[in-house]
Amino acid sequence: QVKLQQSGAELVKPGASVKLSCKTSGYTFSTSYMSWFKQIPGQSIEWIGMIYAGDGGTGYNQKFKGKATLTVDTSSSTAYMDLSSLTTEDSAVYFCARGYSLDYWGQGVMVTVSS
Amino acid sequence: DIQMTQSPSFLSASVGDRVTINCKASQNINRYLNWYQQKLGEAPKLLIYNANSLQTGIPSRFSGSGSGTDFTLTISSLQPEDVATYFCLQHNSWPWTFGGGTKLELK
């Protein structure tokens, strides 16, 4: 069955970077898309961007350009998101979700930015 | 960016009630509208895609309707396990945008 397994919770200092992973199984990763989302607990959800695993092509929400960088490793069927120059406003839960349909989601990972 | 206005933001209903949640887009999004259910501490779960298509495995008491700018999610007979927050998402154009959410609780 389709699974998206995200890496564990992160506690990072302001100004630092963090790399989140989303390891997939149960479907053909190399010809699929992956989207990433941000959710501050108790609030709505924001779309960060999308990557096509076939060629690494990306599309970003303008709001997250320069903040988030999406990559993939097709050999391990894993998608990654780098978040840079972190501030307290980046503290949130981040989700990955499959394709355009967003039918399968990772469990989410809490990123806490604090000194 | 397309703004998605969801209403109500909070809803209290009894088991067996018919529940409707609305989403209004700031411009025409055709039928590119999905509905998600999110329980506390969990990832969103796809209920309805492309306005009115029921996702596999979702109970038939959930249904969606609408096109253009106005959309509705209906739960025909509320069950205790439906307590959750519901979000709409437009995927007509980038950036994809969500409604503010509707928190549904039991009366």
Image (cartoon, helix red, strand yellow):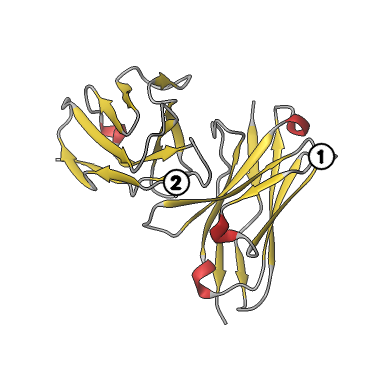
Picture residue at 32% right of the left edge, 22% below the top: B63
Specify the quadrant of the image occupied by residue A52: top right
Query: What quarter of the picture does the C terminus of chain A occupy?
Result: bottom right
Identify the disc placed on residue A43: none
Q: Residue furthest front?
A: B27
Q: Secondary structure at mark 2?
A: strand
Residue, x 74% and y 43% (percent of image)? A57
Badge 2 amino acid: Thr
Vertical placement of B47 versus A114: above or below?
above
The disc numbered 2 marks a residue on which chain? B
Q: Is residue B103 visible?
A: no
Kind of residue indicated by mark 1: Thr
**Horizontal arrangement in the rendering, residue A20 relative to residue A44 (left or right):** right
Q: Nearer the viewer, residue A48 or B43?
A: A48
Q: Quadrant of residue A83?
A: bottom right
Is residue A78 found left or right of A37 in the rendered image? Answer: right
Helix, strand or loop status at disc 1: loop
Nearest the viewer among A11 and A88 is A88
> In the image, is B97 to the left or to the right of A33?
left
Q: Is residue A82 above or below residue B91?
A: below
Left or right relative to A65: residue B67: left
Q: Residue furthest bottom?
A: A115
Residue A40 in the image: x percent, y percent?
44, 60
Which residue is identified by label 1?
A74
Distance in Å between CA atoms under marks 1 and 2: 28 Å
Q: Which residue is depicted at the point 66% across and 53% down?
A: A7
Q: Chain of mark 1?
A: A
Counting from the top left corner in percent of width and height, residue A25 is at: 71, 33
Determine which residue is flagged by label 2. B97
Picture coordinates of residue A46, whole percent (x, y): 48, 52
